[in-house]
Image (cartoon, rainbow, N blue to C red):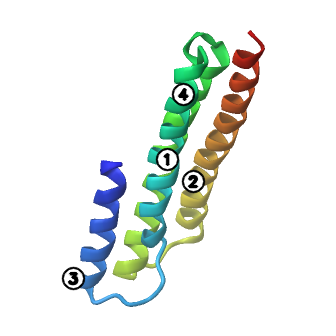
Amino acid sequence: GVMGLICGVYFREFTKIMGFTGVTTLSKAHPHLLMLGTVLFLIVALFSERLSLETEKTFKLFMRMYNIGLPLTVLMMLIRGTLEVIGAPLSKGLDASISGIAGIGHILLGLGIILFIYSLKKAKEK
């Protein structure tokens, strides 16, 4: 939650200071963190209260994958967005590297969500 708010302030203030009025990836970091970092974990907390999710191996794996994937994804969004705002030219290699690392973060997030759903199914069967 707090990191989402910090990203929102960073986006707003950094673009204002730089006089940037265009579209930037920075604008997406704030909602990504609020939804994927706050809302999802509120949902996890609600399910954890009713089910014994913490005892599931897949739940522990979900937590690890998700908590690596989300910061990785958002970090790449912040890097790309900051470079967009300052108008830094990106080589093909740097552009591809940022996209590739963000892609790995997204894959970890997706696998994490699948593991979470599987953990819910397993915990409910007990």
Query: Is residue 80 visible from the viewing direction of this image?
Result: yes
Q: Where is residue 55 in the image (x, y as percent from the top left)?
A: 59, 10
Amino acid type shown at disc 2: Ala
Q: Where is residue 3 in the image (x, y as percent from the top left)?
A: 33, 51
- Left or right, residue 87 beside residue 119: left
Query: Is residue 68 visible from the viewing direction of this image?
Result: no
Q: Is residue 109 above or below residue 81?
A: above
Q: Give the spatial CA distance, label 1 vs label 3.
A: 30 Å
Amino acid type shown at disc 1: Val
* Mark 3: secondary structure: helix
Q: Which is nearer the N-term, disc 1 or disc 2?
A: 1
Q: In this view, does 21 lie above or below 62?
A: below
Instruction: Give the image quarter of residue 125.
Output: top right
Q: Mark 4 points at which residue?
A: 63
Q: In this view, does 26 lie above or below 58?
A: below
Which of the labelled discs sits on residue 17, or is there none?
Answer: 3
Which one is closest to the eye, mark 1 or mark 3? 1
Which one is closest to the eye, mark 2 or mark 4? 4
Residue in the foreground of this view, choosing between 93 and 32: 32
For label 4, count other residues whose C-alpha is less than 10 Å away and answer few (under 14), some (14-19) or many (20+). some
* Mark 4: secondary structure: helix
At x 69% / y 29%, what residue is drawn? 115
Instruction: Give the image quarter of residue 97.
Output: bottom right
Q: Give the spatial CA distance, label 3 vs label 2.
A: 26 Å
Contact? badges 4 and 3 (CB < 8 Å): no
Q: Which is nearer the N-term, disc 3 or disc 2?
A: 3
Q: Mark 2 points at which residue?
A: 102
* Mark 1: secondary structure: helix
